[in-house]
Image (tube, helix red, strand yellow):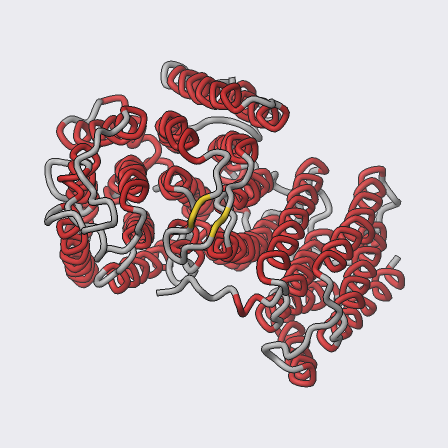
């Protein structure tokens, strides 16, 4: 179980770096889809006990939503918006990768400062979850296209989900499903908003959304 | 009972998407609001039985916030009957830039409005932290289409910012929930269920470091939604671009719901003996919010933004009151009631002014008292009430908070609080009085005294009446409910 979890966590870090360094929106969406599948694997392997009905259900639903439904919605929004790449982001790609490295080190340090009451499947889990959340937050702040910001929101959510799946074994299924449903509706509403932004402005650059201020 | 409170708005909300006729939808909206208010009133005789292993139950704070939400929704429903009548099926000219735009379909408006009520009801009766999170995120998602009711680029910008900023904030609150779950793992025993009652009962077994980290994340997350500075940036945009009736609900009901999330977290913290940690943070955020609001209210050129910043101010006061603790907690809860009613009334009056003057600029609107006698009077009454002038309810609640702070000997806090309130009073007085008095501007068609429909003035007038009443006489049942709620937080 530990080997599987470790592999999934390391691949999660690699996809985070790919997201930080990628200019193509379509590729970004596919990386997020891959993260969704990895989270499904993590759900199944995060706990020592045998596979329970609960974890299998959760793994199927979460990887179905995060690995297939969200990317499909986002790819449709991408087609409607008719854009291919993120050009001139607020923070350049090399700098983004450098910041990502620093963030990874910071997450490792931070998780060493927060001792967990009970041991986890892998010591990598908390730092990787924190790093993934940070990557998502950074993408929201540092990228200009509305669609990349939605991708960032999903990456952030993935990091938090990884933390939850790994550390809290007995969250009731109902709550987990509620969370997934909320994220689903969020991506749906955001996708509609991206579509409206592209129609209203002929592009999806959020730096043009700057009329309202004091 | 709780099931009925949740199902009525959910089902009628979904029904609105299916109905064809506008008139049918409006009738459903009004009917659902009336039924919901009726059900809420009955909870004051007897608290409804808990459901789903205590996940859903109505306690004293929850009932207070549910009642505020329900009363405001009823007022908003009556007001929107008149509002929708003048808004439908026409292409309209934008009041600021003069382009043409259409509105979202009316089904989206009424449907989302009712689902918004359902989500807020769920917030007030969730005792399971995960469910509370789900409900608060739901309020964001169903209210975003309401902000984008007028389909033009400014409201789209406001809705996008609202969605993005609140979603990120609430995602942090989700991390806070997981941290809380880690704090509740209870090594050597069964994990404590994340239900408010259980957490408070077994608070001594919570892991202190993780609990503190969880509180911080929940405060930041729900604080974003509540509009505490410096996380308030979505709020003025959303409130200025949304239809006034939606602003009234956002400001009066939704911000309170997020505040309830913070109260629940604080309740667990103080049961675990970590009250001081949370209180210091709340006082800090509170004073910062009031200060930021004061800076932006003085010299504000858009009167709906001014009301939005006033909401930031009052959320700061709520946070400050709970942070001071003791008698100020009672004051803070009373203030939540008073602020909601007053702010909703001001937004409804602002909506009437906006409809006739077609301008949100504080310098272009003149002579409201002359053109719209009732709304103008309500505008002035609302200003006096919101700035805490006697004899309105807000005077009483602010005084309670100040008195508690003096009793605790926190002179610095009192001095800062009163100075900022003074600055806000002067800033708002300049804007409101200038708008109310003077001669109406010369337009192509000069504005003359207009008769106002009862639908547009009655809800605001009713709310004003309640605020005045609460200032003169606090009914014993309310005092008792607020006392019980405040007791839980000590």
Asked if residue B319 lies left or right of residue B479, the reply is right
Asked if residue B406 lies left or right of residue A29, the reply is left
x then y, percent, for residue A101: 69, 80
Q: Relative to residue B107, is residue A179 depicted above or below?
A: below
x then y, percent, for residue A208: 53, 68
Q: Residue at x 83, y 58 (%)?
A: A38
Q: Relative to residue B308, is residue B295 depicted above or below?
A: below
Q: Quadrant of residue B347?
A: top left
Q: Residue at x 65, y 49 (%)?
A: A192
x then y, percent, for residue B307: 29, 49
Res. A73 in view: yes
Q: Relative to residue A121, is residue B485 depicted above or below?
A: above
x then y, percent, for residue B409: 16, 56
Q: Quadrant of residue B459?
A: top left
Q: Residue at x 63, y 52 (%)?
A: A190
Res. B47 in view: no
Q: Relative to residue B38, is residue B56 depicted above or below?
A: below
Q: Residue at x 80, y 68 (%)?
A: A27
Foreground of the two, B337 or B205: B337
Foreground of the two, B436 or B467: B436
Which image quadrant: the C terminus of chain B?
A: top left
Asked if residue A7 lies left or right of residue B15, the reply is right
The furthest residue to the front: B444
Foreground of the two, B72 or B484: B72
Foreground of the two, B391 or A41: B391
Total label count? 0
């Amino acid at each position: 179980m530990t080997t599987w979890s470790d592999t999934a966590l390391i691949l999660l870090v690699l996809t985070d770096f790919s997201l930080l360094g990628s200019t193509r929106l379509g590729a970004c969406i596919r990386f997020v889809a891959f993260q969704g599948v990895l989270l499904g694997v993590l759900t199944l392997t995060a706990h020592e006990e045998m596979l329970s009905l609960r974890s299998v259900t959760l793994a199927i639903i979460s990887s179905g939503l995060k690995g297939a439904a969200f990317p499909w919605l986002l790819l449709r929004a991408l087609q409607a918006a008719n854009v291919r790449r993120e050009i001139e982001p607020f923070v350049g790609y090399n700098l983004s990768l450098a910041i990502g490295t620093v963030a990874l080190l910071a997450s490792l340090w931070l998780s060493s400062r927060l001792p967990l009451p009970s041991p986890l499947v892998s010591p990598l889990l908390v730092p990787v979850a924190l790093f993934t959340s940070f990557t998502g937050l950074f993408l929201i702040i540092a990228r200009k296209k509305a669609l990349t910001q939605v991708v960032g929101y999903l990456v952030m959510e993935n990091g938090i989900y990884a933390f939850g799946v790994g550390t809290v074994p007995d969250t009731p299924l109902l709550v987990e499903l509620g969370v997934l449903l909320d994220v689903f509706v969020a991506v749906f509403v955001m996708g509609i908003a991206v579509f409206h932004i592209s129609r209203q402005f002929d592009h999806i650059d959020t730096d043009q959304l700057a009329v309202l201020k004091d | 009972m709780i099931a009925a409170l949740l199902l009525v708005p959910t089902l009628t909300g979904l029904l609105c998407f299916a109905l064809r006729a506008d008139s049918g939808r409006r009738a459903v909206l009004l009917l659902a609001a009336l039924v919901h208010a009726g059900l809420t009133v009955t909870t004051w005789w007897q608290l409804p039985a808990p459901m789903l292993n205590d996940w859903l139950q109505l306690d004293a704070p929850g009932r207070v916030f549910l009642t505020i939400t329900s009363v405001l929704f009823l007022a908003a429903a009556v007001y929107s009957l008149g509002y929708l009548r003048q808004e439908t099926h026409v292409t309209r000219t934008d009041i600021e830039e003069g382009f043409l735009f259409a509105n979202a379909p009316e089904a989206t408006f009424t449907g989302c409005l009712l689902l918004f009520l359902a989500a807020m009801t769920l917030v007030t009766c969730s005792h399971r932290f995960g469910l509370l999170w789900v409900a608060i995120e739901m309020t964001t998602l169903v209210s975003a289409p309401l902000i984008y009711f007028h389909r033009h680029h400014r409201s789209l910008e406001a809705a996008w910012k609202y969605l993005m900023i609140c979603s990120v904030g609430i995602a942090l609150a989700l991390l806070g929930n997981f941290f809380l779950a880690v704090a509740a793992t209870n090594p050597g025993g069964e994990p404590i269920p994340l239900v408010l009652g259980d957490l408070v009962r077994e608070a001594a077994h919570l892991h202190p470091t993780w609990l503190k980290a969880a509180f911080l994340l929940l405060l930041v997350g729900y604080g974003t939604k509540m509009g505490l500075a410096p996380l308030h940036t979505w709020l003025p945009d959303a409130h200025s671009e949304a239809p006034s009736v939606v602003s009234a609900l956002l400001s009066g009901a939704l911000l309170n719901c997020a505040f309830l999330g913070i109260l629940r977290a604080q309740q667990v913290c103080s049961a675990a003996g970590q009250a001081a940690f949370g209180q210091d943070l709340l006082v800090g955020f509170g004073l910062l919010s009031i200060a930021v609001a004061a800076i932006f209210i003085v010299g504000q050129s858009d009167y709906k933004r001014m009301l939005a910043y006033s909401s930031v101010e009052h959320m700061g006061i709520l946070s400050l009151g709970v942070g001071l603790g003791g008698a100020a907690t009672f004051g803070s809860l009373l203030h939540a009631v008073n602020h909601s009613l007053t702010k909703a009334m001001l937004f409804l009056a602002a909506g009437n002014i906006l409809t006739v003057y077609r301008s949100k600029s504080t310098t272009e609107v003149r002579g409201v008292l002359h053109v719209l006698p009732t709304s103008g009077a309500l505008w002035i009454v609302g200003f006096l009430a919101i700035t805490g002038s006697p004899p309105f309810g807000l005077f009483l609640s602010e005084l309670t908070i100040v008195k508690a702070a003096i009793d605790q000997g926190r002179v610095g806090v009192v001095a800062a609080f009163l100075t900022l309130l003074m600055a806000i009073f002067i800033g708002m007085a300049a804007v409101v009085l200038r708008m109310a008095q003077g001669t109406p501007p010369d337009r192509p068609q000069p504005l003359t005294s207009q008769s106002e429909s009862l639908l547009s003035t009655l809800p605001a007038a009713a709310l004003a009446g309640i605020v005045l009443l609460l200032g003169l006489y606090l009914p014993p049942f309310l005092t008792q409910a607020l006392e019980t709620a405040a007791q839980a937080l000590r």
